[in-house]
Image: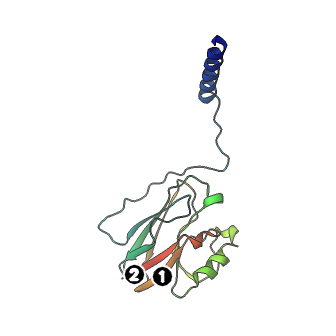
Amino acid sequence: MRLFVRLVAATFFGLILISCGGKKEKKEGFSYEKKEVKPRDASDPNSIILTSNDAMQFNKKEIKVKAGAKVTLTLKHVGKMDKSVMGHNFVLLKQGVDLVAFGNKAATKKETDYIPSGTDDIIAHTKLIGGGETAVIEFDAPAKGVYDFLCSFPGHYALMKGKFIVE
């Protein structure tokens, strides 16, 4: 019995020492970027905060703005994964652009962060961000109508898409 108690005590203290000690190493290529972002004016319908996460989701499937005004869109990646694994962006497409065709084309453009260069299919887009990062863009609201938005990281557009409605 005494041996058993000593064995349990030794195991317990050993686990405590292991969990408390040791040098923690920083993962190469992964960082959290703190940025100063203008506070959102809740009274401005054209000031949008959109979050994305590690489960490939935007927090909104529909965004409504007023026509003829400047839109400020803040994209926050509330997950923890690096942008090379779970990167997100916001891409607003012009009316009539096929979302699936655009998403497939964008998936092959790693060198430009999955934004096809030389295309006139895009109204506005953010940079690609990873966990803990934020991107802010400003653009003029397009004409009244319904537009598609998506994340152009490979395969994400299947879940990360929505409607951008200009009233």
Q: Residue at x 66, y 50 (%)?
A: 29
Q: Quadrant of the C terminus?
A: bottom left
Please name whichever residue, 25 or 163, is drawn nearer the observer in this view of the structure.
163
Residue type beneath disc 1: Tyr
Q: Residue at x 31, y 64 (%)?
A: 42
Q: Are marks 2 and 1 in contact (CB under 8 Å)?
A: yes
Q: How is the image coloured?
A: rainbow
Can you give x and y, in whole percent of width and height, for residue 115 in the image?
62, 73
Q: Quadrant of residue 105?
A: bottom right
Residue type beneath disc 2: Val
Residue at image mark 2: 166
Can you give x and y, in whole percent of width and height, for residue 22 in the image?
65, 29
Secondary structure under tag 1 reads strand
Pointer 2 or 1: first along the chain:
1
Can you give x and y, in whole percent of width and height, for residue 43 in the image?
29, 67
Q: Residue furthest left?
A: 43
Secondary structure under tag 2 reads strand
Q: Residue at x 32, y 69 (%)?
A: 44
Please name whichever residue, 12 or 145, is drawn nearer the observer in this view of the structure.
12
Can you give x and y, in whole percent of width and height, for residue 94 in the image?
52, 84
Q: Residue at x 37, y 76 (%)?
A: 65
Q: Is 155 situated left or right of 35 in this image?
A: right
Q: Quadrant of the N terminus?
A: top right
Q: Residues within 10 Å of mark 1 (few under 14, many from 20)?
A: many
Dot label at residue 147: 1
How far separated are the C-alphas under marks 2 and 1? 8 Å
Q: Residues within 10 Å of mark 2 (few under 14, many from 20)?
A: some
Dot label at residue 78: none
Q: Is residue 158 above or below residue 75?
A: below
Q: Is 37 situated left or right of 151 in this image?
A: left
